[in-house]
Amino acid sequence: MKILSIFKKLKFPSFLLISLILVGGLVYLNFRLDSTEKSLSAIKSSQTNLRENFSDALFEDHLKVTNAMVTEASFASLQKELDTLKAKDTSDEKTIKDVYDSLLVLEQKINRNLKAGLKSPDLTEQKDAWGDFLIEKDFASITTGINEQTADLDKDYSAYLTKLEQTRVAASGYSYQTVQTERGTFGAHVIKLPLNEVKVKTVSASSGSCSNDCDTKSLADYVKDSGGFAGMNGSYFCPPDYASCDGKINSFDFALYDSNEGKWEHKDALSWFETGLITFNGRDPSFYRETSDYGGGGVTAGISNYPSLVKDGDIVVDEDDLTSFQKDIKGPRGVIGVGGENLYLAIVSGANVIDAAYVIRSLGAKHALNLDGGGSSAMYISGKYVVGPGRSLPNAVVLTK
C-alpha cells in the first residue's frame, strides 16, 4: 500500500502501475517454480539412489549383526571351556587334598592302634597301588581303599575299648561304660554296688526347709562330712546363675529326707503325684513312681525328683510330661536306680531324659529316678571327681559303708 501511495504521489499513470505489478508477480512465480522443480529433481534422484542401494545397506547391516553374534557366541564358548577346565583343575586339586588328609588320618589311627597293643596292617603294597591310582587320577579307588582300612582300624579299636571298659571296674564299683540301647549308644559314668555292701544317705546343706539363699556345699564336702566314700548330685534346684531363680536362689521344692538330721525337708511335697521317690531303710530300697504313693514308712534316706524313669523294668517316662530342657537338650543326666540286688548311680553323657531311662535299664536297673544334670552334674569317688565338680549343691546323694 505504501508503494502504491508513492506511485500516486509521483503521478504515474494507472495502466503503467498495473503493468509493473503484473510483471513483478510473474517474475516471482517463475523463480518459485524453478526452485520447486529443482527440489523435486533432487528428491527423485535420492529415491532412485535409495532404491538402488537399499538392499546393499540392509545386507551390510545384516553382516555387522551376524559378525557380532558369531564373535559373542565364540567368546562365550571359549569362556565355557575355560570354566570347565578351571572347575576340573579345582576339583582334582580338592580331591587330591582330601586323599592326602585321609592318608594322614589313616596313619594316625594306625599309630593309635599300635600304642594300644593292637595289630595293624602292613600297607606297603596298598600304598604302591594307591600311588599308581593317583598318577592315573583314579581317585575313587584310592578313597575306597583308605576308607576300608580306616573302618577296620576303628572296628578293632572299638572292640579294644569295650573290653577295656568292662575290665576297668574298680573295687569302689566305679566304671565308665559305653552302653548300647534302642535309642543309640551312650557313655555313662556308673557306680554299681551290691545293696548289702553300701548304705545310702541323702543330705542337705540347710538345717531345714529353705526357700531362698539356701546353704550349699561342694559334692566333695558332702561326702567327707557324711563319712562317705562316694556321692553324686541330688535333685533339681534353682541355681544363682539363672535370672528366673531370683528370690529362690539355691532352693529346691522336692521332698528330701536328710539322713544326717533324721527328718524330711519339704515334707508337704510328699503328696505330689508328678514326682517320683526312692527311699532306703538301712540297706532296703523302695521305689514309688508317684511320690504320693509313699505311705509314710520309716526311712533312713529318701529323695524325690521328676520324672520317674523305670518301674519294674518298664520305661515309664512320658515325653508329653517333660519340659523342653528334658526332652530336647542332649547333655549329662543324673540317675539313681536299683535292681538285681544292686544300687546304681549314673551320669549319662550326651543324653536327654528319655535316653537316660534306656541307659539305666540297660545297665540293669529295675527301678530308676531322674536326678539333676547339666551344669550341676557331679560324681565323686575315692577322693576324686570323675565328673564335675559342677555347681555348689543344696543336696546330694552320699554312699557310706
Image (spheres, rainbow, N blue to C red):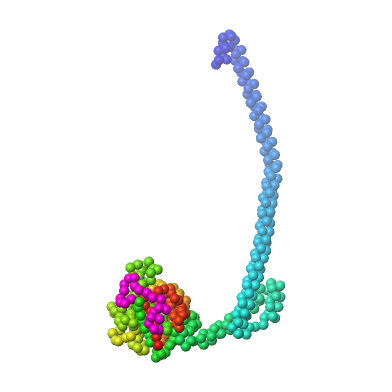
Which residue is at a point 66% across and 63% down the rendered structure image? 86
**Relative to 74, does residue 357 appear above or below in the rendering?**
below
User: Which quadrant, please, contains the N terminus?
Assistant: top right
Stretch in magenta: 206-228
Residue 280 lies, in percent from the top left, at 35, 86
Does residue 287 appear to the left or right of 138 in the view shown?
Answer: left
Nearer to me, 371 or 388: 388
Give the residue drawn at x 53%, y 85%. Answer: 164
Residue at figure coordinates x 63%, y 24% from the top left = 29
How many numbered circles are shown? 0
**Residue 396 among those drawn in magenta:** no
Magenta span: chief secondary structure: loop
Which image quarter: residue 230? Answer: bottom left
Is 246 situated left or right of 351 in this image?
left
Q: Which of 54 and 299 is in front in this view?
A: 299
In this rendering, would 243 be left or right of 349?
left
